[in-house]
Amino acid sequence: MQDKVVIVTGASSGIGYATALKFAEAGSKVIAIGRNQSALKELRDESVTLAGKIKEQLTDLRETSQIDRLFTSIMDNFGRVDVLVNSAGIIATGSLFDTELDSWDKMMDINLRSMFYMMKKSVPFLTKGQGNIVNVSSVAGPRAFPNVLAYCVSKAGVDQLTRCAALELAPKSIRVNAVNPGVVVSNLHKRGGMNEADYEAFLNHSNTSHPLGRPGRPDEVADLIYFLASESASWITG
C-alpha cells in the first residue's frame, strides 16, 4: 500500500483512528475524515514517525456540500483515490416505540446516506486505478438486537449497499467489501449516551457473549480492513 491514497471516514476515534494509523504505517497517504478537530490533530501527530502521511480533514458527512468540497480538495492535492474506508458511524438506544424521527434520520444520514454518497463520489477516482471500498458495518446488520432499532436497520442497509455496489462495480474492477465486528472497545457507545457504569457492565457481558471471551480491539478490525483493501484480497468482493 506504499504511496496509495486512502480516505478513512470516522478517523477521529475507534476503528477509523486505528485504520488510518494502519495505512499510514504501511506508507499510504491517508486523508483522515472526522468531526473532532483535536482528535484528528492527535492522529496526525501520532503518525509523524510512520512511513506514510496523514492529512486531517474536518468534515460533517451529513452535509453533501462538504463532501463535494472534500473531493474537490482531493482532486487538487492528490489527483486520485485508491481506497475508500467508510468507518463513520453513530449509535443510539431506542425501540420502535420511543425512537424519535429526528434520531432515526440522523442515524440513517451518518451510518448509511453519507456512506452511499462517499461511494458515489469516489467511483470516478477508483475507476482510474481499479481501487476498492471497505465499509464498516456491524454484527447488528445481519442480526437483530433489542433497543437499538435504528442502528440495526442502518447497518443492515450498509450490508445490502455493499453487496449491490459490489455487483455494479465489478465490471470496473472495483471491489467492495464490508466488515461486521461484534463489540469493539471504543467511544461509540459512550458517545451514544451510555454512562461509564453501564458501559463497564456492557463490556463485562461481552466477555460471555463473544466466543473468544472478550470484546475486540480497534486495531484488530483495522488489520482486517487493511487485508481487504490490499492485493492479498484481490479476488474478494461483495
Image: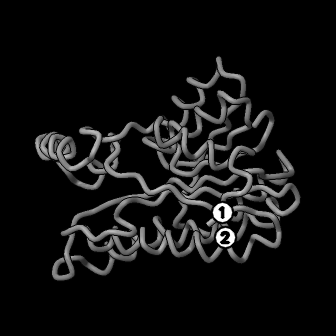
Q: What residue do we see at 52% from left, 66% from top?
A: 62
**Circle 1 sits on which residue?**
237
Front residue of this view, candidates 200 and 213: 213
Q: Kindly identify the residue that appears in the image at 46 percent across and 65 percent down.
A: 111
The quarter holding residue 185 reads top left
In the depicted structure, whether residue 39 falls above or below residue 64:
above
Task: For the C terminus, give its image quadrant.
Answer: bottom right
> Secondary structure beneath disc 2?
helix
Q: Amino acid at mark 1?
A: Thr
- Check residue 166 in the rendering and tell me which mark sits there, or answer none: 2
Asked whether the beta carbons under mark 1 and mark 2 sit within 8 Å of each other, the answer is yes
User: What's the residue at 75%, 37% (across, down)?
Assistant: 1
Residue 203 image point, x, y percent = 20, 42
The picture places residue 122, in percent across and down from the top left corner, at 73, 63
User: Around disc 2, counting alpha carbons within 10 Å, would you say few (fewer than 14), some (14 to 19), or many (20 or more)?
Assistant: many
| Secondary element at image label 1 | loop
